Amino acid sequence: MQDRRRESLQRTRDGVRVSARRDHSIETTRLNMALHVTKRSPINCAMDDVFRALADPTRRSLLDELFKQDGQSLSTLEERLPMTRFGVMKHLKLLEEAGLVVTRRRGREKLHFLNVVPIRLVHDRWVSKYTEPWVATLSDLKRRLEDKTMEKIFEIYIKTTPERLWQALTDTEMRRKYTFGAVVTSDWTAGSRYQGVGRGTPIFEGENLEVDPPRRLVQSFRAVWDDDVKSEGTSRVTMEIEPIGDSCRLTVTHDQLREDASNQLYGGWPMVLSGLKTLLETGEMLTTPGSLHWADGPEAVA
């Protein structure tokens, strides 16, 4: 009897021990599974932070502001957003945690800078080296079509024929008389280059994109007379001639200008068109100071 009790007790003790071991093993397995599910690589964690930061329109607006002007203080950014200083601070903190914004101390100010590296890492993860050129091309096209640009439209009625007006636009000698004395040369075919020179110095240049005489002339336009206008890049000029009775309506559209572009690029059109109208209707040249800007040097032709 005693032996049976010892055997039963031993089995019980062994059973408890076995059960305890099994319970411990199960808990360990569950813990390992939980760790396997919740544990993420540093790269995934970083990307999650980036997507979380970019999901909010206010934070995207802050990045837009830093893209326009890097190195802004909290006070400057606060002025650009319709929210409290504390709210801006919270958004900036999330952007910093995602690595999209970095800060530097300059004296007593804390300046914020845009860091595009995390966005590039997201790009590189899903865009292969083979699709990169296509993606870049489509992205550039979308940006060109949707980005905020500026256009200026000028319209004038001139008592002349479409053929005569077209000649005035493309003839070197006639054009010199109303384009501030600039000498414009080209063969006026689609795809050809043109250049305007004043006193021996190039002042503008571009390509003839569309040439449809005597109705439509489309050109790219790049001002080169000084470093400020060179930095504005390339824009587009479209000249359209429409007969109206015994006259013509000339519409000049200067577009694809950078938003807030320098008015030096388009501010001269009213004077140019006035000079063109005067020349075709009277045969005379304007003698206002602006119209003679490039004609008062030693190379000017009377």
Image: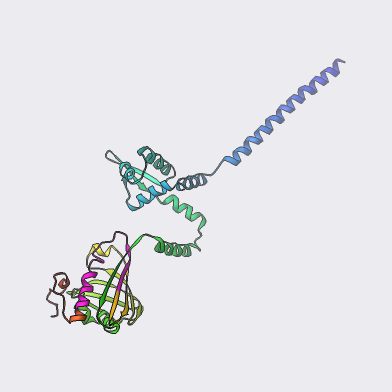
Q: Quadrant of the C terminus?
A: bottom left
Give the image location of residue 48, x and y in percent: 50, 46
Question: Which residue does the image show at 76% across and 24% down from the upper left?
Answer: 14
Residue at far top of view: 2
Above or below for 74 versus 26 = below
Question: Which residue does the image show at 17% across and 72% down from the upper left?
Answer: 291
227 on left or right of 302: right
Color style of the picture: rainbow
Location of residue 38 (image quadrant): top right
Q: Is residue 28 visible?
A: yes
Q: Is residue 253 magenta?
A: yes
Location of residue 157 (image quadrant): bottom left
Q: Is residue 182 visible?
A: no
Question: Which residue does the image show at 60% across and 41% down from the upper left?
Answer: 37
> 229 or 177, which is in the foreground?
177
Give the image location of residue 68, x and y in percent: 33, 53
> 106 or 164, which is in the foreground?
164
193 on left or right of 143: left
Above or below for 113 versus 251 = above
Q: Is residue 299 magenta?
A: no
Q: Quadrant of the N terminus?
A: top right
Q: Which residues are magenta?
A: 251-278
Give the image location of residue 268, x and y in percent: 22, 68
The number of numbered discs placed on residues in the rendered structure image is 0
Give the image location of residue 32, x and y in percent: 62, 37
